[in-house]
Amino acid sequence: MADLPVPFTGAMVRALIEGRKRQTRRTIKRLRGGAAFCRIADLWPAPAVLDYRFEDANGVWHDINKDELLDRLPYRVGDRLWVKEKYLPDPPANDPSWDDHTCTYVEWSGCGSKVSDIPPALRLPDHVLYATNPSFFGYQMRWRPGMHMPRWASRITLIVTEVRVERLQAIREADAIAEGIEPHKSGWMPYATMFYESDGVTPANYHVDPRISYMQLWESINGPRSWDENPMVAVYTFAPPILANIDSLPGAAP
């Protein structure tokens, strides 16, 4: 078991908060201790006991079975994942923690507002603004990329309960829904549409098949034609999202 970061887009963060998202698919590009990855069956008939093939950092190819592959994926069953999202630190200016700190609030706010210069006592999610908060929609904010979010600023924790590997297009209807697609009208949200209601924002159509909705969501995140590439993906299922910082939870990964 390990504590590890996992990035999500704003739409998927909202899906986590609303309880709609219980799965995430990630293209397998690298393995623990390895480089390129591909499946044996894509190259030649696979032996009964060997299912996958990957190239390590030294350029040596290895044939491995399913269990060995799962052990080499970035996340494993039991891992605790702290969610990275677009954010903005917002420590209180009048807190006494600044009094005996290396810099004052005025100095901090006027010199780049480095996260590392925030007093330790103020490094809490309570002092962070999040881009998915509807209160900030329409405002010009200097949001910081989620990839730079420190562990203490994370407000969502996921515990991995299942891991498997499959082709992207093998997704089932129930899995597409578990990925957090939005219900819309009598079906599911069209993430790529040219038809809108009179407000110019709300899609006028919908998809009956949740897999089509997810396909469009995937391409909105990963780029045009990324669905057609049908990559090998790691499918991570997790328990209901915990809306709390990972370090506020009982227990810790060794």
Image: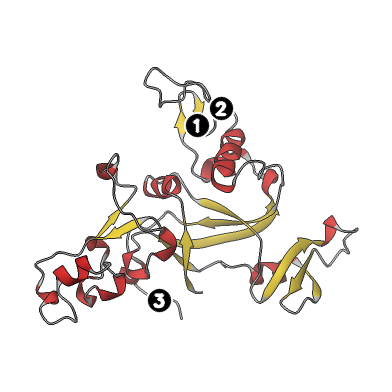
How many residues crowd mark 1 within 10 Å: few (<14), some (14–19), many (20+)? many
Q: Is residue 45 left or right of residue 82?
A: right
- Disc 2 designates what residue? 207
Q: Which badge, 2 or 1, is on the more N-terminal residue? A: 1
- Which image quadrant is residue 112 in? bottom left
How many residues crowd mark 2 within 10 Å: few (<14), some (14–19), many (20+)? some
Q: Which badge, 3 or 1, is on the more N-terminal residue? A: 1
Q: Give coordinates of residue 127: x percent, y percent.
A: 22, 62
Say which mark, if any, is on residue 120: none
What amino acid is found at the position of numbered circle 2 in the picture?
Answer: His
Where 165 sits versus 168, above or below? below
Q: Nearer the viewer, residue 14 or 10?
A: 10
Q: Nearer the viewer, residue 55 or 238?
A: 55
- Disc 3 designates what residue? 252
> Which residue corresponds to the image point at 50% horizontal and 21% vertical from the top-left?
195
- Disc 1 designates what residue? 189
Distance between mark 3 and mark 1 Cα atoms: 38 Å
What amino acid is found at the position of numbered circle 1 in the picture?
Answer: Met
Asked whether disc 2 touches disc 1, contact meaning CB atoms under 8 Å apart, the reply is: yes
Q: Give coordinates of residue 189: x percent, y percent.
A: 50, 31
What amino acid is found at the position of numbered circle 3 in the picture?
Answer: Ala
Q: Nearer the viewer, residue 155 or 153?
A: 153
Q: Which badge, 3 or 2, is on the more N-terminal residue? A: 2
How many residues crowd mark 3 within 10 Å: few (<14), some (14–19), many (20+)? few
> Which residue corresponds to the image point at 53% horizontal and 30% vertical from the top-left?
190
**Helix, strand or loop at mark 3:** loop
Distance between mark 3 and mark 2 Cα atoms: 42 Å
- Which image quadrant is residue 198 in? top left
Of labels 3 and 2, the one closer to you: 2
> Which residue corresponds to the image point at 9% horizontal and 74% vertical from the top-left?
96
